[in-house]
Amino acid sequence: MGELFKTEEAGEYLGGVPAGTLRAWRHLRKGPKSFAIGRNVRYRKEDLDAWLEAQYEESVRGDELVES
């Protein structure tokens, strides 16, 4: 299954996203994939990486060629 992160750890891995934001995203069904083991929420490293890549692809700017 790979490396698992608690909510706080996932937030740190994502560059400092507050745990409360991740909880809100989970409630709203947005943000990176997460799942529950009993009452404990976990995030897989590969899901965090996939979400980060998707955010990059959606928001990256500056790839246009400039001709003079």
Image (tube, rainbow, N blue to C red):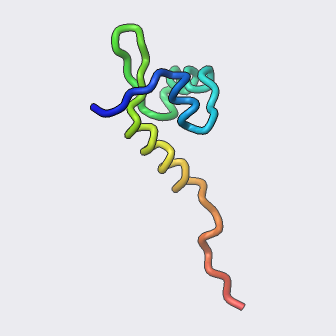
Q: Kindly identify the residue that appears in the image at 60 percent across and 54 percent down.
A: 59
Tell me the quadrant of the picture where the C terminus can be found.
bottom right
Q: Kindly identify the residue that appears in the image at 61 percent across and 75 percent down.
A: 64
Q: Kindly identify the residue that appears in the image at 44 percent across and 43 percent down.
A: 49
Q: Whole-percent x and y of residue 5?
A: 44, 26
Q: Is residue 42 above or below residue 61?
A: above
Q: Kindly identify the residue that appears in the image at 63 percent across and 63 percent down.
A: 61
Left/right of residue 15 with respect to residue 47 in the rendered view: right
Q: Whole-percent x and y of residue 29?
A: 48, 27
Tell me the quadrant of the picture where the N terminus can be found.
top left
Q: Residue furthest bottom?
A: 68
Q: Whole-percent x and y of residue 35?
A: 38, 22
> How many numbered circles does the render carry?
0
Q: Is residue 13 above or below residue 60?
A: above
33 and 44: which one is in front? 44
Q: Residue furthest top?
A: 39
